[in-house]
Amino acid sequence: MRRAPLWCALAAVLTACGVPAEGAPRFRDEADVPFGLLERTTATTTTTTAATEPGGGPPVCLLSDEVIRTVPRGTAGSLLERLREVPTEEEEAAGLRTALPDPEIVASVVMRGGVAQVELRDDLLDLAGRLQRFAIAQVVCTATATPGIGQVRFRLGDTSLPVPRGDGTLTDVAVALDDYASLLATP
């Protein structure tokens, strides 16, 4: 009867790895819940893997032929620096341009918990509908190319800034690259 020790060992493993059973659920005070877990959001989280060149940093995204394209760059820089980058002469010759009217329109970037909080200047509000969508899509594409960033939330000063998704609907919650799929170049 060699099966008895095998069954006993299997039963011991299965019961030792479980969560202790309780008769009823326990409720916790909101103060005991770790930071950020109770926040509600309707945006989806997208994790991206940045395509980098050897020894370089994440790519930037630029506008070309009415679509946003991912452009590899050989230099690493902060997300704020990459959001403010303008096309090189070679990129301009290839038809790439920035959708941002002024690189300084991005005032600051704070990254926390997979979300880049991007503060914009109010110049963005001067852009017409489709141009504004391309500008926001360019920022989201560049930000989510940063390892660990899956969403972007926009601010204007101390207030949440409603931004257009790719389909033109406005939202004031964090957005992801998927929200701009219609404006992105297909690989």
Image (cartoon, rainbow, N blue to C red):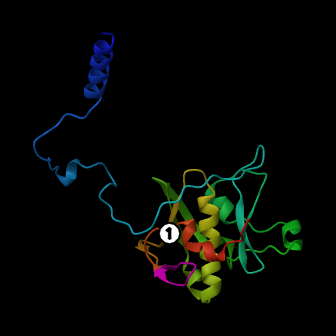
Q: Is residue 105 visible?
A: no
The residue that appears at 27% across and 21% down in the rendered structure is: 12
The residue that appears at 26% across and 25% down in the rendered structure is: 16
**Splitting the image into 4 quarters, where does residue 165 fall?**
bottom right
The residue that appears at 59% across and 55% down in the rendered structure is: 48
Q: Quadrant of the C terminus?
A: bottom right
Q: Is residue 55 visible?
A: yes
Q: Is residue 23 above or below residue 143?
A: above
Q: What is the span of residues highlighted in magenta in the rendered image?
A: 163-170
Q: Who is closer to the viewer here, 78 or 96?
A: 96
Image check: 5 left or right of 84? left
Q: Is residue 52 above or below residue 124?
A: above
Q: Would residue 148 be counted in the magenta stretch?
A: no
- Expressed as whole percent of the image width and height from the top left, the position of residue 158 reads 42, 71
Image check: 70 left or right of 149? right
Image check: 160 left or right of 103? left
The residue that appears at 80% across and 73% down in the rendered structure is: 96
User: Badge 1: how crowded within 10 Å, few (<14), some, or many (20+)?
Assistant: many
**Amino acid type at mark 1:** Val
Residue annotated with mark 1: 175
- Expressed as whole percent of the image width and height from the top left, the position of residue 152 reads 52, 65
- Expressed as whole percent of the image width and height from the top left, the position of residue 160 reads 42, 73
Please, which residue is most extreme toward the bottom here? Answer: 128
Q: Would residue 164 be counted in the magenta stretch?
A: yes
Q: Who is closer to the viewer here, 176 or 102?
A: 176
- Expressed as whole percent of the image width and height from the top left, the position of residue 112 reads 46, 54
Dominant secondary structure, magenta: loop
